[in-house]
Amino acid sequence: MAVARIYQRPKNAMQSGRARTDRWVVEFEQTERQEPDPLTGWAGHGNTAAQVRMLFPTLEAAQAYCDREGHSYHVVPAPERKLKLQAYADNFR
């Protein structure tokens, strides 16, 4: 069976909003090395499970899916939010 990675998407660095960061993602890890195609030069491999990405509303739902389908998995903890508190007066120091 495939090894799955369960993680929570971080906030997009290009935007200030936190849309879709509450969902949990299940991705399958690659099991074979990518080979360049001799004709086009594009990288590819025969494992199509590595192209699958599924979204779940909770961590428990993602874990239940992996348990039900017989996939082994590991959970990557969500990155800790770092708040950089600034005051307008700091611009004039």
Image (cartoon, grey):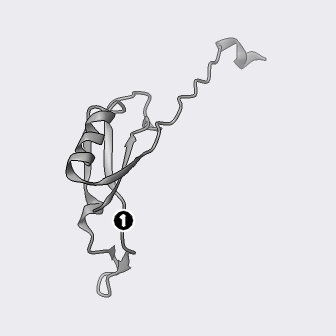
Number of numbered discs on residues: 1
Name which residue type carries label 1. Answer: Gln
Q: Is residue 85 left or right of residue 74?
A: right
Q: Is residue 8 left or right of residue 47?
A: right
Quadrant (top left/top right/bottom left/bottom right) for the N terminus: bottom left
Q: Quadrant of residue 38?
A: bottom left
Q: Nearer the viewer, residue 35 or 89?
A: 35
Q: What is the residue that sits farthest to the bottom in this orientation?
A: 38
Quadrant (top left/top right/bottom left/bottom right) for the C terminus: top right
Q: What is the residue that sits farthest to the left in this orientation?
A: 68
In this rendering, the answer to whether 28 lies above or below 61 is below
Tag 1 residue? 30
Mark 1 Cα shell of 10 Å, populated few (<14), some (14-19), many (≥20) = some
Which residue is drawn at the image coordinates 37% and 32% (left, top)?
21
Q: Position of residue 76 (x, y in %)?
A: 45, 44
Which residue is drawn at the image coordinates 33% and 38% (left, top)?
24
Q: What is the residue that sits farthest to the right in this orientation?
A: 93
Q: Is residue 43 left or right of residue 91?
A: left
